[in-house]
Amino acid sequence: MGGSGTVPSAGAPEVRGSAAALPQEALEIAAGYAFGGPALDLGALLWDGRCLPDAQVRVPLPMLNRHGLVAGATGTGKTKTLQLIAEQLSAQGVPVFLADIKGDLSGVAAPGQQNDKVRSRAAEVHQEWAATGFPAEFYALGGIGHGIPVRATVTSFGPVLLSKVLQLNHTQEQSLGLIFHYADTKGLELVDLKDLRAVVAFLTSDEGKGELRSIGGLSTATAGVILRSLTAFEAQGMADFFGEPEFDTSEFLGTAPDGRGVVSVLELAAVQDRPQLFSTFLMWLLADLFHDLPEVGDADRPKLVFFFDEAHLLFDDASKAFLDSITQTVRLIRSKAVGVFFVTQTPKDVPADVLGQLGNRVQHALRAFTPDDQKALKATVKTFPNSAYDLEELLTGLGTGEAVVTVLSEKGAPTPVAATRLRAPESLMGPVKAGALERAVSSSALYGRYAQAVDRESAYERLQSRGGKGPDEMREPRGGKGPDEIREATGAADQRARRKEQPSVVEQVVGSGMFKSLARSVGTQIGREITRSLFGTARRRR
């Protein structure tokens, strides 16, 4: 773009090239992104088919905790956009959480590889590209995949999220909530799924039916549905996700010695055929952060930016109460300096009450091959503020690595809609080699803390150990163990071997006269400290 430039309108950045030929709308768009404070550089403005490299499209760093949406059809570049934003957040000292559905975001830890496409893109948008790797930790749900295992106890996961995973209806969800309430008040910690089965079986036995009678009771039919759902859930290999050591989500808030934010990559490729499980687990991670973090108000930068991929899976078939909890969590977690970006195909995948809270938008291309596609396109256009572009035409004509952007300015007002040619990530655009990933995981300081599953004493084990004792001889149930005690516990393999020799849960629970006395021992350390959040998630005080 040759020729001399002219002075743009007041407040607008200089636009290189024949600025006199640009419509006033383009100059006003460029002025809307001329922020003075720290910001992330997304790319350069596109107007009338031209890339204007000196009209940079940016998002203010303090506004990243006002949440966002990254949307677009498959293959339009959403993953690279996540990587680009994650890199720049890390460089500015902000930790990032990335859900890696396809298994190709591990490359954020390795320097990128320059090629003709990268050089061309960098030149087009005036990017000073340099191959750079960023500090990263790698996680996997329940240890299935390459990564440090992320587990939750059944107690902390709570009845609301577990009901969604088990696909229970509203009545069954209420009954499960009653079971959790009973376990909480009696100090019966539910570490894994066998603990929950034990409590359900007891509450439907002749001996245990009276325990819940004063607050509604538990029907045998509903208990049967819950038990069958748990059995099917375990048969699909899901039991590994529940247990200890339970993951402490504050690990996501780390920074490297050089001050850069750590990028936490949760690999989900190995469980992508279980979408309801991983989407609900992501919500548990977010709810747990909400539960633990203090209020900070409007911070000058986020404590964490959390990318929630395949977001539509969370909202599919969700009850109104569940959606209300999501909406309230998203609304309130902003004041704890956590930004949440939902990643999906179209904005209509996200409920209106949640979408209304997503101030930063990066919309990649949409396809309009079918009537349903066309309907989704029109709905997407309506979600944007007034635009100088014909958005229906623009959104179907964007190329890979191009997007329509609108963000919140430093004053919290929406910026003009800007068609943008995005920058190229500086880290590796693709997965690192398996060997390098395994070395990174095993050398992590967190590996020794979470790698080995343990099965300490909880509701099920306490029942076994107290067989044959009278009520007065039963010792006080133990509180939760700390990390050092857990690491010193008996190995999981030995525990499993012992359990194989024991009678079934139902036989032990229904046949034991001691469980009722055990369950009535109120006021234990665990029972006193259980508090539940919006989603029914819970933690013992750390």
Image: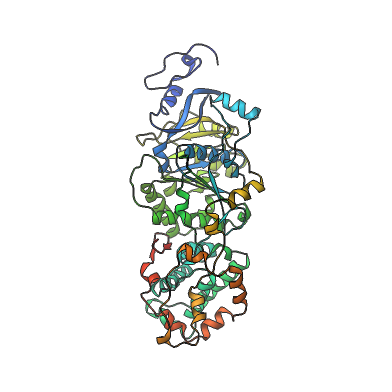
Q: Position of residue 247 (x, y in %)?
A: 49, 58
Q: Left or right: where does residue 400 sit relative to residue 302?
A: right
Residue at the location (51% across, 76% down)?
A: 460
Q: Position of residue 412 (x, y in %)?
A: 36, 37
The quarter of the rendered structure image containing the N terminus is top right
Nearer to us in this view, 326 or 103:
103
**Up/down of 55 relative to 517, above or below:** above
Nearer to us in this view, 191 or 159:
191
User: Can you tell which quarter of the image residue 124 is in?
Assistant: top right
**Up/down of 71 relative to 117, above or below:** below
Numbered disc total: 0
Can residue 316 be seen? no
Residue at the location (39% across, 50% down)?
A: 333
Q: Position of residue 87 (x, y in %)?
A: 52, 38
Q: Position of residue 390 (x, y in %)?
A: 51, 30
The quarter of the rendered structure image containing the C terminus is bottom left
Nearer to us in this view, 168 or 197:
197
**Up/down of 143 relative to 171, above or below:** above
Residue at the location (59% across, 53% down)?
A: 442
Q: Left or right: where does residue 443 sit relative to residue 341?
A: right
